[in-house]
Image (tube, helix red, strand yellow):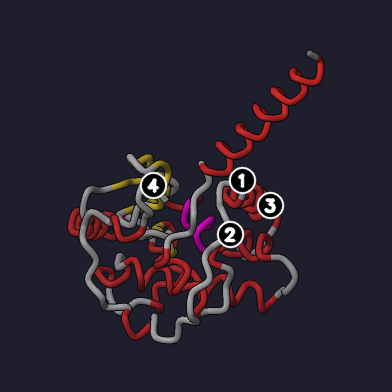
């Protein structure tokens, strides 16, 4: 009887583990390809995007490309056009250094030179390429930890803000399965102008994955 209880307990533990593991997200292919083009771990790029712009969707918590942050307040829009129109208004009354845009929330004041226009800045591929480049630059300045690079992405001066952000990104990393192996991406920047459906679903995995 005791043996049976032990076996039953072990089975329940295994079932709980499998359920937990099955609930973890796989990094969508778009992020994997962009990250590979910049020699950045896909999990790092995706976890930063989750921290920056996540939204509750039927598939679960996912980054949302039509996101703005102005003076510390987040705004999420249904379409790219709505986000861009709102951005034009915000830019008239706020310093660009207080405006973050897109799926990875790239700051327009500090990194606006990475975009040819504010419309282009909202393109998920362009925005993620900028974010991956920033992460890579942070790593190059201080190699050793991609979590530290994430802290630098948020607050290059370091200190408590970077440490808090590092902890947030670490919690997002715990939600992820290892990303699938894909051929090395070499043409992501060349495809940066690819149009993306306004529903943004190209950037999330189906519920079954």
The spot of residue 192 in percent (x, y) is: 32, 78
Q: Which residue is mark 1?
A: 171
Locate residue 114, reporting x and y percent. 40, 78
Front-lying residue, 131 or 8: 8
Query: In front here: 146 or 83?
Result: 146
Q: Is residue 87 magenta?
A: no
Mark 3 element type: helix
Q: What mark, if any, has residue 208 been given in the picture?
A: 4
Q: Residues within 10 Å of mark 1 (few under 14, many from 20)?
A: few
Distance (Cα) linking label 3 and label 1: 13 Å
Span shown in magenta: 45-50
The quarter of the displayed image where residue 112 is located: bottom left
Residue nearest the observer in this picture, 15 or 168: 15
State if disc 2 and disc 4 touch (CB < 8 Å): no
The 10 Å Cα crowd at callout 3, few under 14, some 14 to 19, many 20 or more, is: some
Which image quadrant is residue 162 in?
bottom right
Residue for point 57% across, 73% down: 40
Q: Which mark is residue 163?
A: 3
């Amino acid at each position: 009887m005791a043996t049976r209880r032990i076996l039953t307990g072990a089975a329940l533990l295994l079932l709980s583990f499998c359920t937990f593991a099955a609930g973890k997200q796989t990094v969508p292919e778009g992020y994997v390809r962009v990250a590979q083009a910049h020699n950045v771990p896909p999990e790092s790029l995706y976890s930063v995007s989750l921290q920056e712009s996540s939204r509750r969707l039927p598939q679960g918590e996912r980054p949302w490309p039509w996101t703005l942050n102005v003076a510390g307040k987040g705004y999420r829009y249904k379409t790219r056009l709505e986000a861009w129109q709102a951005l034009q208004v915000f830019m008239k009354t706020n310093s660009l250094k207080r405006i973050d845009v897109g799926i990875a929330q790239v700051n327009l004041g500090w990194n606006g030179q990475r975009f040819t226009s504010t419309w282009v800045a909202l393109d998920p591929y362009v925005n993620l390429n900028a974010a991956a480049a920033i992460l890579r630059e942070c790593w190059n300045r201080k190699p050793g930890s991609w979590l530290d690079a994430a802290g630098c992405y948020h607050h290059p001066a370091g200190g408590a803000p970077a440490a808090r952000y590092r902890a947030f990104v670490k919690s997002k990393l715990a939600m992820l399965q290892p990303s699938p192996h894909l051929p090395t991406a070499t043409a992501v920047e060349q495809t940066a102008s690819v149009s993306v459906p306004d529903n943004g679903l190209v950037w999330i995995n189906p519920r079954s994955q």
